[in-house]
Image: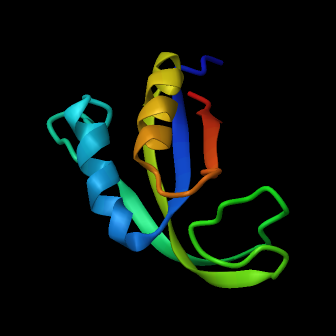
Amino acid sequence: MNVDYVKVEVYLPEEYVETMRNELNDHGFLTVGNYDHVISYSKVKGFWRPLELATPFEGEYGKISHGTECKMEFSCMRDQIEKVRKIIVDNHPYEEPIIYFIPILV
């Protein structure tokens, strides 16, 4: 089996989905066949607690917070992972973005 592609999942506030989509698309990472801007996203609920050295986007140090955010999903080639990661980190509002690269078996 070859692992040429990965599924990317990134968690972010809904108001950042369009900006992130545009930035990834501008670099050519959201094209599938004859389509571009190809992503999906869904709303999810999350929990987090900022620790002592954190500078949180939302929430207060030492207190458990919860809220709604979005899970944005798309695919890219395995050899594009580092470029995609850099774009996400450079455009993400969270101090520690949650990003998953999941192998797609073909």
Query: Residue 48 or 7: which is nearer the viewer?
Result: 48
Q: Nearer the viewer, residue 69 or 3?
A: 69
Number of numbered labels in the structure image: 0
Q: Is residue 11 above or below residue 48?
A: above
In the rendered image, is residue 18 in sight? yes
Q: Residue at x 48, y 30 (%)?
A: 86
Q: Position of residue 7 (x, y in %)?
A: 53, 41
Q: What percent of the width, then of the height, locates residue 84?
A: 45, 31
Q: Relative to 94, say whether 23 is above or below.
A: above
Going by the image, does 51 lie left or right of 89? Answer: right
Of residues 75 and 88, the one nearer the viewer is 88
> How far across and how far down the image is residue 64, in percent?
80, 81
The quadrant the C terminus occupies is: top right
Report x, y in % for residue 46.
Answer: 68, 76
The residue at the point 34 percent across, 71 percent down is 15
Q: Is residue 18 above or below residue 65?
A: above
Residue at 46 percent of width and 21 percent of height: 80
Q: Is residue 19 left or right of residue 93?
A: left
